[in-house]
Image (cartoon, grey):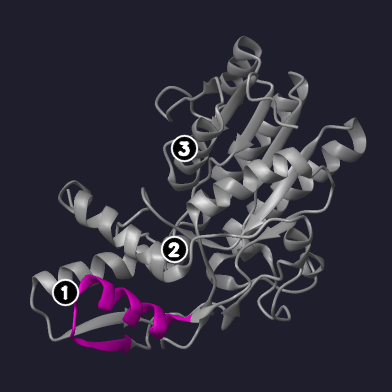
Amino acid sequence: MLDLDASIYVAGHTGLVGSALVRRLQQAGARQLLLRTRAELDLRRQADVEHFFQQQRPQYVLLAAAKVGGIEANRTRPAQFLRDNLQIQTNVIDAAYRCGVRKLLFLGSSCIYPRNAPQPMSEECLLSGALEPTNEWYAIAKIAGLKMCQAYRREFGFDAITAMPTNLYGPGDNFNLTDAHVLPALIRKCFEAKLAHAEALLVWGSGTPRREFLHVDDLADACLYLMNRYSEEAAINVGWGTDISIAELARLIADEVGFAGALQFDRTRPDGMARKLLDVARMTALGWRPRIGLAEGVAATCEWYRAHQVQLRR
């Protein structure tokens, strides 16, 4: 069980997932949260990470820090996605083990599954085929982190677990159009199209790929649930188990924002995988289910963006 009186380090607490974890831990009554910004602790620097762990001695670690981005960011910066994520997770997992951390949760990603994996994708699909080229470098790094957790459990008995979330969204997301994921990018595009009185909204790709989306607050709840109830080598999927096409998602967001124009699809842009849907049977069997439906979550995220759009455009 997660001891809420013990020190808990949330790596990456300023990001989408990390900030949600902090909210959930505070709601649960956590008393000693260890939080460091990137300026205060660069997780890519091994000596700095080791010093932090030796000085602070956290008892639990939630590893949400990562370099993330959409298709275009992955395409143009493969070395950064591979290097930075390998450095971050290697330094944190190793230092956590060496400093006697009781339990660590590593956050993987649904993009680690093969491009042609059967749908919905079960945990057993891992390493059963070639990866999707549009996120290959990030996926390889995340697979390495997952395997590192498994290796440290096998060799050293370190209680490291891995959660594999589906596509995430929510307050605090990245809405920068150069490297945002599809849902926040569509939210920003719809707001700007409405403001400009545009006749149409341009959506990358054909609109036919299907994606599953999970509100980040649901993921945070699932992470605490796993910290309390799960201690196995196998990674575990976290999602809804239902999906939606990109075209349907774009219309859902447009309706929520109040943009009534047409949707146009730029088929010169890559689609990525035709479908990405997680098999969540194992998580469901543990007794956990998400609570925030897509329409509700999109509405709340649009409201958050509306309140913060001026500063986000800077």
Pointer 2 or 1: first along the chain:
2
Magenta-colored span: 245-265
Residue at x-position 61% and y-position 73%? 132
In front here: 284 or 110? Answer: 284
Residue at x-position 64% and y-position 39%? 89
Q: Is residue 294 visible?
A: yes
The residue where tag 2 is placed is 70
Q: Is residue 44 visible?
A: no
Residue 92 sits in which quadrant? top right
Please indicate whether residue 198 sits to the left or right of residue 2 in the image: left
Instruction: State the separation of the CA atoms marked 1 and 3.
Output: 32 Å
The residue where tag 3 is placed is 23
* Disc number lying in front (1 or 3): 3
Q: Position of residue 259 (x, y in %)?
A: 19, 78
- Mark 2: few/some/many CA within 10 Å (<14, 14-19, 20+): some
In the structure shown, which secondary structural element does the residue marked by tag 2 occupy? Answer: loop
Pointer 1 or 3: first along the chain:
3
- Kind of residue at badge 1: Ala
Q: Which mark is residue 278?
A: none
